[in-house]
Amino acid sequence: MFLIDDVVLSPLKGLLWLGEKIGDLCDKEISDDGRVMERLMALQLKFELDEISEEEYSKQEKEILAQLEAIRKMKEAGG
């Protein structure tokens, strides 16, 4: 009986495992301040090379800095 249960439930267990792994990767991606810093440096480079306007730079910079601040607060609260 347990063998039949294992065979029937194995796809569901695999799907749950996959969901957990994807969730872990998303959490890691969201809380990685290194990636956010890379985005900020790339934005600065675009601005210096006149690929974006000062207005667009300021808008994106505020968004990135807010995200970086949120990551740092989350790490302080959790650590």
Image: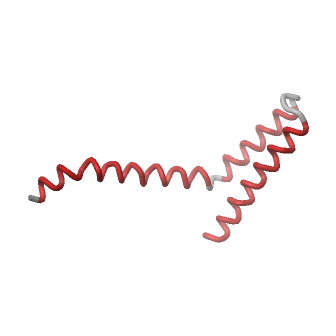
Q: Residue at x 34, y 49 (%)?
A: 15
Towards the viewer: 44 or 19: 19
Outermost residue toward the right in this view: 54
Q: Where does the image place residue 33, in percent across and percent down from the top left?
A: 68, 53
Vertically, is 16 above or below 43?
below
Q: Is residue 24 left or right of residue 66?
A: left
Locate the N terminus and report the quarter of the image it occupies.
Answer: bottom left
Outermost residue toward the left in this view: 1
Q: Is residue 22 left or right of residue 29?
A: left
Q: Where does the image place residue 56, in percent across and percent down from the top left?
A: 85, 38
Q: Is residue 48 left or right of residue 19?
A: right
Towards the viewer: 15 or 39: 15
Towards the viewer: 33 or 53: 53
Q: Residue at x 75, y 59 (%)?
A: 69
Q: Residue at x 54, y 51 (%)?
A: 26
Vertically, is 74 above or below 7?
below
| Quarter of the figure with residue 41 | top right
Locate the C terminus and report the quarter of the image it occupies.
Answer: bottom right
Number of numbered discs: 0
Q: Where does the image place residue 13, in percent across and percent down from the top left?
A: 29, 53
| Quarter of the figure with residue 42 | top right
| Coloring basis for residues | secondary structure
Q: Is residue 27 left or right of residue 66?
A: left
